[in-house]
Image (cartoon, rainbow, N blue to C red):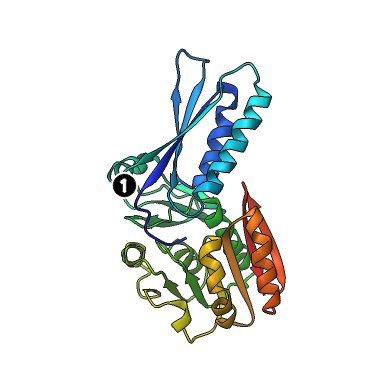
Amino acid sequence: MGGKQPEWTEVSLLTPVEAAEVAADFIYQLTGSGVELRDWGPPGGPVEVVGYLPLGAELQSYRRSLEQLKERLKKDYPDQEIRLSFKNLPQEDWSINWKRYFHPQEVVPGLVVGPSWEKPELKEGQKAILIDPGQAFGTGQHASTILCLKRIERLARRSELPGRVLDVGCGTGILGFAALLMGAQSVLGLDLDPEAVKAARINAEVNGLADRFEASLTPLKDIQESFPLILANLTAGEALPLLDDLVRCLESGGELVISGLLNEQAEQIQASLEEAGLSLVEQGSMTGWVSLVMS
């Protein structure tokens, strides 16, 4: 999911200590960024779970999901205080705070993603991608990104990962880097945000992939090449205007992996792609997010 995120909303959920781990995991999977747990009073008392939501078209959907979580917790813990609040956070504060929560993590089997300033300790068989997001979206820990990474890993495990890949909305470049580390030969990454393209180019250098990863501001409509694999980790609002061009740029028999969709949006996207002649190969889901594999 590429693009500059100028501001963020801090979400705070006060929850019983028994539910803190579940709440933290839910917020982590929803936001894709780190979550902080703060004790609220004496040990064994309520816990404040704090995370960050990017301002944008999907913010209201995020908030609805969190409101639903709050209501479920109220039913499960009727005698305990459950409180949910949101606060806008200026970019300069977020840019300092988020680094505290970004640490190396194995996001799919064999692939560790971490910050460029904290080199991970790899186990046998693991490979690492080092990321410095800058002002762009993409640390590899958001559910929509993980859904794409899972598909890339499955293709690689089956020796079905093609040599040439297109990553639309490349952000920091993480999906393209993963494809290259798992067996692809070259990747073209597109993003309309100059900050994302800048971050992707820097990260390609850091990971020693600059000779095989091209980051470009070229709009998808101007791309004339066709690809055997297209990755599109986008919001539904970003994806809908691009569907015709995504289909046009897909090789016959190729595979389109489209992620970043909320449950209620996936059906519309799938129907549109089926009208364009594609068929569903696989659907993935993770904490309310959906990915579609179409061919």
**Residue 154, image x, y percentages:** 63, 63
**Left or right side of 103 for 164:** right
Give the residue pinned by disc 1: 91
**Left or right side of 191 for 285:** right
Question: In the picture shown, does residue 180 fall above or below 113?
Answer: below
**Residue 245, image x, y percentages:** 54, 79
**Residue 253, image x, y percentages:** 66, 81
- Residue at 70% across, 76% down: 275
167 or 277: nearer the viewer:
277
Report helix, strand or loop for mark 1: helix
Disc 1 crowd, CA 10 A, few/some/many (<14, 14-19, 20+): some
232 or 183: nearer the viewer:
232
**Residue 230, image x, y percentages:** 55, 73
Q: Amino acid at mark 1?
A: Gln
Question: In the picture shown, does residue 60 fall above or below 188?
Answer: above
Residue most toward the top? 42
- Residue at 51% across, 73% down: 184
